[in-house]
Amino acid sequence: MRAADWVVLVATLAAIVIYGVWKGRRQRRLEQYLLADRQMQWYTVALSVMATQASAITFLSTPGQAYTDGMRFVQFYLGLPIAMVILSVTAVPIYHRLKVFTAYEYLETRFDNRTRTLTAGIFLLQRGLGTAMTLFAPALIVSLVLGWNLHLTTIVIGVLVIIYTASGGTKAVSWTQTHQLLIALTGMAVAMTIAIRSLPDSVGFTEAVKVAGHMGRMNVIDFNFDLSTPYNFWSGLFGGLMVALAYFGTDQSQVQRYLTGETVTQSRLGLMFNGLVKVPMQFFILFVGAMVFVFYQFVAPPLTFNPVQSTKVRTSAHGAEYQALEATHETTFAAKREAALQLVAAIDSGDADSIARKKADLQTLQQRDDQTRKTALALIKKNDARADAADTDYVFLTFIMQNLPTGLVGLLLAAIFCAAMSATASGLNSLASTSVVDVWKRLIRKDLDDHTYVIVSKWMTVFWGVFCIGFGLYANQLGSLIVAVNKVGSIFYGTMLAIFLLAFYAKRVGSTAVFYGALIAEATVLLCAWKTDMAWLWWNVVGCVVGVVAALVIQMFVPARPAATA
Amino acid sequence: MTEQPPILKTWPRLYAAVLGALALEVILFAILTRAFH
């Protein structure tokens, strides 16, 4: 990394931290600190909601997924716009009317303190782990690229986030997120432009899309119903809807973002904007990955994308075997490049038979190369049992470091850091809110003045920051990051959603039925995750359905509850 | 009483627009997928 890259990276990060601290200065009331005085306009709510979900994992891992697996991951987001509409109709007016600080506070109004504490506890566990992984992703980048100590890097990034999140609260988080998201998306657009402009002269944008399509990277929609397939239209629509309802409706890291809206209208518009833009945005990020795939049809990629592991295996007892695989990869690439150029020529000629023949040739070579890569990754695992054999998360980073000009490398790294910081900041902010409002203020000290609760909130932000740094140091054992984050969430989201659905719609169901229904649902999800090969998106559906049905059945055997208050 | 949205005049219309955009995206994705199937 050159000096210009360092200047861009350091200046961007410093500007974000200083801006956050400045924006959030002089806050003495809890509503001011945790909810920005409920004064945010729709565009800040919208960008904050989007930036919270779009972490560095999104910008690093998603293009890598498109590179190896095509664009079908976009189906995961198909339920999101529907969820935005449902939440705008139901949750937003209720939360605003009750003027709650957290989603779980509402559950005490509706059920009892036990249900509130249970859901707050689940949130703290799940979001604490999720935020730790969100923090870990950029640390992985820097340590990998610059040879920094991974632990030290995690600590430095974590401390930067803690500084402006603890000092400035929600106002600092929301305002920095608007800038961070714009920087991140600009970085992605720059990367895609460079990938396309670096293709051979005969390969324009249209040809690049067609090559990606012929090589199976434009497989956006799959209408086949299959419970064991992670991403298809049905799992995206139903599983994705459940995930989005649970995430945006019951996860404080998101609820807190739209609770800052000045009115119901401002919060609703923020969610509607997210519903409108999220799917195209994810498509765009995956498309960048597909273009990187096309780029690597013409420029030789490394055999494997984790440079630390490839260096390690090269110098090990398996070195000769690995180098033989590298030689095979180079030979295959040369043939593949020629076949790709011939496919482009066939596409330009418009001859369908020729296209089919050249496509088959290129696919055969790609399969051969995939097999070589698979063998190499298995060798890495054989050499080091603790190594992460999946190198999907390194693909986009490798492309950035090896192919972007000076200055733009710094910009892209800044973009990835911004994404990581924004999602981490939301996580810490919501963890502090729940810890203070649902635990400290409710169960430990009810009698403190508002300013003291602000101070406690700041210390809670620091506590959760330190927790996330500590856990993040061990996150590199968890495989592909984006899948890991979503898997952890999916263990709990179905149950959480069941509780909130019962709260919103089943007015006859009381707290005892909900509490035990939730425990049964969580046990069922854990059983599915442990004992079956059910794809993780369906865990959300199972948790939700079992939770609702179990609570309704239990309610038949317990005394009826009094009329609902909300 | 909730105020009306600044565009499309009513909330149901705005919700329909968001869901309509989703349906359009699915159709476009299906066309894109079929083009290379």
Image: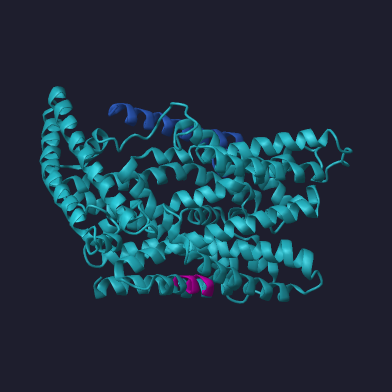
The x and y percentages for residue A223 are 43, 27
Q: Quadrant of the C terminus of chain A?
A: top right
Residue drawn 57% across the image and 66% down it: A171
Residue A168 to residue B30: above or below: below
The x and y percentages for residue A322 are 21, 54
The x and y percentages for residue A468 are 54, 66
All told, the count of numbered labels is 0
Residue A315 to residue A192: above or below: below
| Coloration mode | by chain
Which chain corresponds to the colour blue? B
Q: Is residue A184 left or right of residue A360?
A: right
Q: Is residue A226 left or right of residue A187?
A: right
**Residue A287 quadrant:** top left
Magenta segment boundaries in residue numbering: A157-163
- Report whether residue A494 is seen: yes
Residue drawn 88% across the image and 42% down it: A562
Which chain corresponds to the colour cyan? A
In reply to whether residue A400 is colored magenta, the answer given is no
**Residue A116 quadrant:** bottom right
Q: Quadrant of the N terminus of chain A?
A: bottom left
The x and y percentages for residue A491 are 58, 47
Q: Nearer the viewer, residue A79 or A310?
A: A310
**Residue A516 quadrant:** top right
Q: Nearer the viewer, residue A372 or A111?
A: A372
What's the magenta bit mostly, secondary-structure-wise?
Answer: helix
